[in-house]
Every structure is written in structure tokens, then in C-alpha cells.
Amino acid sequence: MKFARKVWKLLVAIKDALVLVFLLLFFGLLYAVLSMRPTPGKVSEGALVIQLDGAVVEETADVTTSDLILAQTTNAELPTDVRARDIQRALRAAAKDEKIKLVAIDLSRFTGGGFVHLRDIGAAMDAVRASGKPVLTYADTYADDGTQLAAHASEAWVNPMGGAMAVGPGGNNLYFGTLLQKLKVNAHVFRVGTYKTFVEPYTRDGPSPAAIESYTDLYGGLWRSWQADVKKARPKANLALVTGNPIGWLRNSGGDFAKASQAAGLVDKIGTPSDFAARVAQLSGGTAAETSSGQIVGTQLATYLAAHPEKTGGAAIGVVTIAGNIVDGDAGPGTAGGDRIAKALDDALDNDIKALVVRIDSPGGSVLASERIRRSIERYKQKGVPVIASMGNLAASGGYWVSTPAQYVFAEPGTITGSIGVFGILPSLERALADIGVNSGGVKTTPLSGQPDLMGGLSPELEQMVQMGIEDAYGKFLGLVGKARDKSPQQVDAIAQGRVWTGERARQNGLVDAFGDFDAALAYAAKTAKLGNAAWHVQYIGRKEDPLNALLLQMYRRRDAGGDIAAMAARRQREQLSAALGQAEAMLSGQGMQAMCLECPRVPAAARKPQGSVVTGLLLRLAALGGK
């Protein structure tokens, strides 16, 4: 009977997978038919409802049918991210829209975003409030990112079992130096740059003095910017108490996290989701009956964006987005695949584009991919097309490399940039194998025969050649920056060495030209292209918006509970574990020369797509059933 039950479960699993496939095909065909006559979404009078169920990002990742099947069969998470620019566009349109009476932002399942994106969204929230319309936020628990957005709300609501936090940037990295010594694994590190700290976890047991200096300066600047943004929006918030004496702050409210948050001015109202929905209904003219389930009634973000598309007509200003880690190949969107982006740029070169804006939100990555993207951007410059760089949260290492063709660079004070340095890592296991009696030997025709040898070790000749290649790449990096910034290589070297800077410091040392957001870069591009008062529109290069992705995501989207402070802490721990695994993978993945920033914030966990294939997912599911 036990065997029969296992066979039955196996058949049921196969049946479920096939049903899901046919459902997806059906809805895909249905969508194709409906999309032949697209109609804008209907905006009802009342509230604009923005549910941030994921991270705020520069560029969202595509969701394919196979991704959806894999998520269903392995219970993995799919990206439910929202593009920062879409939120800003919706908010600024709502400020002028007579149908919209208020904006309600649900942050219960918000997983974070970069400071620059959140500051810009906060400014758009302020614009809505300035038009006389209230902006309400709700969350079970606010972390720093959510607290920053809630500061700009006219009413910030929190669950009675939750609260708001302000912990500040920084924290610990893992260092594997002693472990690798104990395991007798040789991490051959090649680098240039005193402050190029990405390799330190593989050679040390803690950060070097240079790393401490860099971290202190960077995180201090980011923390000052965060506090300034929150204090400006919410002057009565007692951040000094919350961050300086968190235990005393909580004890003053008898350990009640929600009441402590309210007393400190981080939130305004304490209530359940039903209470919040009733308040939104009250302000928008709805009824209590509509909100009995706790569902917020109003026009959803996707519907509102469909009814308010970005402007078209007139001259085209091209925008290429370089978001996420820069890698070799065709990866992305959401990851900056060098081949994909370079090909898209090359394909659009003959289009009638009056100016090109390079929008960067990347901690860097492959030197080879960064250079390929840079060359494709350079071709626009050679053609006489003005090139403007716009830096978001991150434009460090390879992210700075791709900005060098620009004739003018915009950043924001909270942008993380610089990190001009190069490194490479090649592990070998000869000591570990020798310890268990495994040795290597053979005949070599040259000093490089069989190199790099993971099992037998690296030859001195190869080590010297790799280091020379790293130094040559660094020299090229200095030359590119020097030419772009009108500095000598020696002057660039003095502010390079892998050192990471905030946008504020980068402007002081000449790595960027001016402070300004994406819209400022677009306006400057139009001015540089001498368009005058002529109409113009944005033409995104290499990204064709596919509404089918939104349909698939809506089919998948789960509205799980956001969680209290303990749930938030558990989520942070999972993110730390993911980061640790990422560090180990970085050493073992066999990547080439890298220009990557260790100090840069990690990509939010929700922004990562499940890895593997549909077949792998099904096998994992079936294996789990077989073990029951």
C-alpha cells in the first residue's frame, strides 16, 4: 500500500504540472487575443492603491512561463518587484488627477529599495500632499526602507503587533581566511587597489584598516543622508532616541513596539488592516461594507499606469538601462548581461536618437562585459549623439566603467560610486588533496600546460601573468576615467585604488559633474541635443515591455502576511545566508577579471529569480514526494 500511495502521489504531481502548463497556455492565448485591441485601464474616483509586494528596483526582471512553473513546483519565490520610475510617474500624475482623492501605499510585504529610489519616491509623495491630497501608508513592521517612505506620509499606519525601526546602514561581512587555511584551500587573489576590499573575505579574518576607513566614510555619509531625508519630512520624529537608546525607547512604552513607534513620531496611527481600509474608504467616499475584509478599495497601480502611459511623439531620447550585476552573456533584464545590452545598443545605433542617457544602477561585475557595453556607448558619441550618464543608487566599479563615455554625469548625494579597481580570484585545492593522499603529476610541454590547475595548483608563471593582466586592466580603467574627467592617470589613481564614494564626495573629487535625478538627466540631454521647446519622448533601448509578464505575475502573486519584528529579523537572516552563499560562489564560479563593489548593498532577495529549469523543479518536487 505504501508503494501504491507513492505512485499515486507521483501521478497527481504530474497531473498538477500538466494542468498548470495547459492553464498557462490557455491564458496566454486569451491574452494574445485580448491584447489585439488594447484598452487603457479604467480609473475609478477614489484612492490610488499601490501595493509594494517586493522590492523597488531600477529594472524589473522578466517572468516567463517556465519561471512560473518552476516556482509552483518548488515553492520558490518569483520577483514581484516594482520599477521605481513607475511609482514616481503614478504619484505625480495622481497629484494632478481630479479623480484621485488620496493615495494608499501598502508596505506590508515591501522588501526594500535603494536610498536614491526611495528619496525620489518620497519627493513624489510630497508632491501629492502639496496638491492637498492625503497619502497613507500601512505596514505590519517598517524597516529602515519602509520608515523612510512612511516619513513622507500624511498618515503612517502600523499593525498593533508591529512597529517601525531605524537601524542604519552597515553590519558585518563574513571572512573565510582561517577556514580556507584549515581546509587547505588556496585562494589565489589578484588585485589592484588598496581599498578594493571585495577579495578580503578570502584572505583575512576581518576588514583591513583601509576597509574600515572606506566603510566608515561611506556608511556615515549614507546614514546622514537617510536621517536628513526623514527629519525633513517628519521633523518631530525622535531619531536620536530610537537609534541612540533603543532599549530605553521601547521600555518607555512598556515593550509595546507599535506604541513606542508612535511615541517617537515614526508612525501616526495604530490599527489592523481592516481599520486602515476603513480609513481609506472614509477619505475616498467608500463604505464600511466595502472594507470589511481588510481589502483596500481603489484603483490599482497597474491599472493607473495603463491609463497614464508615458508620453510619445516628437524627437526620441534613447535610454539604456544598466541595472544589477554586470555579467558576460545575455542575462537580464534585472541583470546587466554585457552581450544583451551591447547588442541592443548596436541595433539601435541607426535609429534617429537625438541623445542617449545611460541609466546606471549597478555595483559592477565583469570587466570584459563592462568594456563591451562601454564600446557600444562610445559608438554613439563617435556618431555625434550626446551621451549623458544618470547614476541611481549604485554606479560603482564596472558601473562607473560604463559611465566613462558620457560627456556629463549626474548622480545624487546618496549614490554609491567610484570603487575604481580590478581583481580576480582563482582557487586551488592541491594542499587539501595532498592532506588526504591525493597528489598530481604529469608531463608539461610549457610552463602553462594544464593551467590553471584546480587540483594541482597554479604555476608561478600563470600567477604572474594574471597579476600583470589585472594591473593592465586597472591601468586601462585609470586611462578611461582620466580621459572622461580630464585628469591624468596619476590624479585618478589618487581617488581610485578601489575606494568607494558617496555621490556627495564623488562630486567634490570630480568623478561626477552635478546632482540630479533621472528627469534632470533627461532634461539636460534634450538641452544638449538642442531640441529647444520641441516635443520629445523617451525611447528605452533593448527593453520591450511585455504585458504578458504582468499577467503571469498576477496569476502567481501571493499575498502572504508581512510579519512582526521577529519575522522581519528572520527574513534578514535569510538574506544574510544568501549573501554568504553568494560570497562562496564568487570564489568558486571561475569568473574572469572583476570590477565589483563589496560595500555596495546586496540586491533585495525578492529581486532574484529562482534558479534552475522546469525539469529540475519537477524532479525536486517528485523526489520530495518519494521521500514521504
Image: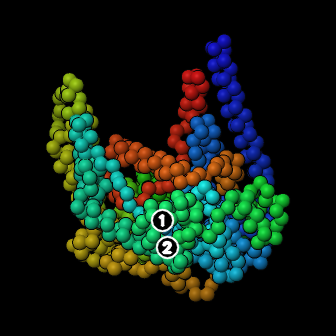
Q: Residue at x 19, y 46 (%)?
A: 463
Relative placement, left or right, of 156 versus 250 is right
Going from the N terminus, do you reach mark 1 or mark 2 first?
2
Q: How far across and down, in percent of the image, does residue 605 sit?
A: 51, 51
Q: Residue at x 27, y 47 (%)?
A: 202
Vertical position of residue 458 compared to residue 240: above or below = above
Please report contact status of discs 1 and 2: CB closer than 8 Å, yes or no. yes
Query: Disc 1 designates what residue?
Result: 249
The N terminus - image quarter: top right
Element marked by disc 1: helix
Q: Residue at x 30, y 48 (%)?
A: 175
Query: Disc 2 designates what residue?
Result: 238
> Pointer 2: residues within 10 angstroms few (<14), some, or many (20+)?
some
Relative placement, left or right, of 244 versus 620 is left
- The way the protein has been coloured in the rendering is rainbow
The quadrant holding residue 456 is top left
Q: How far across and down, in percent of the image, does residue 182 sit?
A: 23, 37
Distance between the alpha carbons at the discs numbered 1 and 2: 10 Å
Vertical position of residue 128 compared to residue 185: above or below = below
The quadrant holding residue 196 is bottom left
Q: How many marks?
A: 2
The answer to whether residue 333 is seen in the rendering is: no
Q: How far across and down, in percent of the image, does residue 31 sit?
A: 76, 50
Badge 1 amino acid: Trp
Vertical position of residue 614 compared to residue 256: above or below = above
Q: Residue furthest bottom?
A: 532
Q: Nearer the viewer, residue 226 or 39?
A: 226
The quadrant holding residue 506 is bottom left
Q: Residue at x 42, y 53 (%)?
A: 327
Of circles 1 and 2, which is in front? 1
The C terminus - image quarter: top right
Badge 2 amino acid: Asn
